Amino acid sequence: MTEFSFELLATDGAARRGRVHTAHGAIDTPAFMPVGTAGTVKAMMPASVAATGAQIVLGNTYHLMLRPGAERVARLGGLHKFMNWPGPILTDSGGFQVMSLAKLRKMDADGVTFQSHHDGSKHRLTPESSMEIQRLLDADITMAFDECTPFPATHGQAEESMRLSMRWARRSKEAFVARDGYGLFGIVQGGVYPDLRAESAKALLEIGFEGYAVGGLAVGEGQDAMFSTLDVTTPLLPGDKPRYLMGVGRPSDIIGAVGRGIDMFDCVMPTRSGRTAQAFTRRGTVNLRNARHQDDPRPLEEDCPCPACRDHSRAYLHHLIRSEEILGPMLLTWHNIQAYQTLMAGLRSAIAEGRFTRFAAEAAALEEMGDIPPP
Amino acid sequence: MTEFSFELLATDGAARRGRVHTAHGAIDTPAFMPVGTAGTVKAMMPASVAATGAQIVLGNTYHLMLRPGAERVARLGGLHKFMNWPGPILTDSGGFQVMSLAKLRKMDADGVTFQSHHDGSKHRLTPESSMEIQRLLDADITMAFDECTPFPATHGQAEESMRLSMRWARRSKEAFVARDGYGLFGIVQGGVYPDLRAESAKALLEIGFEGYAVGGLAVGEGQDAMFSTLDVTTPLLPGDKPRYLMGVGRPSDIIGAVGRGIDMFDCVMPTRSGRTAQAFTRRGTVNLRNARHQDDPRPLEEDCPCPACRDHSRAYLHHLIRSEEILGPMLLTWHNIQAYQTLMAGLRSAIAEGRFTRFAAEAAALEEMGDIPPP
């Protein structure tokens, strides 16, 4: 039996090098979780995701409850078996996608009723049903059911929304079925208002969770506001629990957040960009659709171990994109997930060796340079 | 230096077990060549194609000359390097796709002028230019430039078309630049008319090629007419050269053609079907979109070594298809290519061990049974 726990291995300023232990294995932090929305990290074989160094993937409760259905996933042995990902899985609560994707949603104090964006069928999510669905999916890390406060929101709106989320957080905790190696994370809300973030953090600590997420960011507030909010939030969170910044972000967002004490991240950016010809490199993003690459025999990124860089030229990747070949998204998604995992591995080493500040400065300088000039 | 050659290892009736030696390696026959139209076997990594046992892939001259262009491929080191396929490659002559895809094509005695289906740009293919393009692509096996006789065609139409192809075959031979390990294949035409097939075979033998293809079949004539045509054609071809049946086909077509002395095949069916939820199994084709699979925990095919069968349930494959996830085509394409390569490996063993007839009968009986019943 594995107890769900967080091991703090090293610190460098506010940055932390740690390890989360779960029923399905360990996660070295800082960690980036590739998004596997509907039971697949889009355009990737699970073995390829693992080959990049990723140790945990994220599944979306909203998508999976609608299709194929949580009960069906449970009957088929749980999400790990269903998608052939034997490692840890985190599921979100479903709340965020209900707001962004579902049709005709109706909030009340108890939960939210909505129609599927697939077929209009009617569904309901409450803290209790979200916990039950995430249990059926067999998520190692369950997220409390909350309302993601929209941006912009007035202080009054953010306060009301946060307090609703805190009531739901308590109900989530009460409904969560404790199991060895499984954990429930609470989510700090409160928009960009420091007093509300403090009130939210305090409320969650009183309830008690295995980890704490910072929610309601990366919704349009900008990097400065996001970092300011982290500056006032992470110091309020306990040092012995993992901290997860939801839905973030670009490499510079991640580096800045790690420097502010965040341990875990997820974002659709590397996968989504991989399907739209955008590649992340240490020298910024590269658009492989651009004709400048059509005769370029060089790899996308010189010392990247992914097959896009190891086996192919920029000219070939450009050709695949132009020809709308499926191999284009396959290779670019792989590269982007690899680039993110390489970044996380670099951050972990830098923190362990006490050179996080230099690592962050060098990464910023490289990104500032931009892509290599044409040959 | 490798001489391009064909080694006949065993025979069982008319069926042959052999090996083709080329500049980029050997091909065990009977062989199925996955189609890599535009420099990629669609939805497959090249290493995955090789993992199925495939030893040679096919590239399409028409597609590659238009995009990215043969000169560009040559500048980038040839098609092997461009697509990261170090093994043998066969390219077709471009003639077939000019007829099926190009706009505003105009035939004359010298060649064909046409407009690209991408952008309307004007291009010309002649026996000489087709040889030059295939040389630039660095194809191990070059196909003579011919006209694929449409079906149905009267005896007069088929005769005229075949005689044009024979004149072009001679010009192809004259234009082909001989290189160690590289070969040129002539293509027998003549529709479903035995006298024309005989005339065509005789004409090609007088010119002399490293291999002989049977063209103009699998264009709607039906399996019986195809087999009858093979019955009168393959006995006219030399025993010491490989024989290639172009564009064929379903597993039962392949088995029947192997029994009539064919060594090589190509067909888009396994790859195209993989993108439309159709899986080839020994018990016939299975449509993974069908709701009968939604709760089925069993693998698509019990003892198939591909990742779709090894790592996933029919329920999961069904979910991927329903959710339009890219991983669906990725896994089903892999399975189909594997199923074809497993068939070819079975044929090779059966011929070597003198049990081809029993193998063919067992394969037909299994296919006749149809898919396993729902659980």
Image: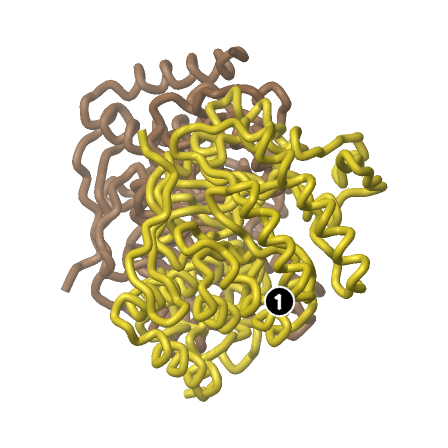
Chain colours: A brown, B yellow
Q: In terms of depth relative to the viewer, which is nearer, B74 or A106?
A: B74
| Residue identified by numbered label 1 | A108
Q: In terms of depth relative to the viewer, which is nearer, B95 or B305?
A: B95
Question: Can residue A97 be seen from the camera position used here?
Answer: yes
Rendered position, A318 above or below A361: below
Q: In terms of depth relative to the viewer, which is nearer, A30 or B312?
A: B312
Residue at 18% across / 44% down in the picture?
A7
In the image, taking residue B155 as reference, residue A29 lies left or right, namely: left
Asked which quadrant contains residue B11, the reply is bottom left
In the image, taking residue B228 as reference, residue B119 lies left or right, namely: right
Asked which quadrant contains residue A108, the reply is bottom right
Residue at 22% across / 47% down in the picture?
A6
Asked which quadrant contains residue A310, the reply is top left
Residue at 25% across / 24% down in the picture?
A350
- For label 1, the SS is loop
Rendered position, A291 above or below B99: above
Please, which chain is the residue tagged with disc 1 on?
A
Return the x and y of residue B229 as percentages of the image width and height: 60, 67
Rendered position, B147 above or below B370: above
Q: How many marks?
A: 1
Say which amino acid is labelled 1: Asp
In the image, taking residue B110 as reference, residue A227 lies left or right, namely: left
Mark 1 crowdedness (10 Å alpha carbons): few <14, some 14-19, many ≥20: few
Question: Can residue A216 be seen from the camera position used here?
Answer: no
| Quarter containing the N terminus of chain B | top left
Return the x and y of residue B285 as percentages of the image width and height: 51, 75
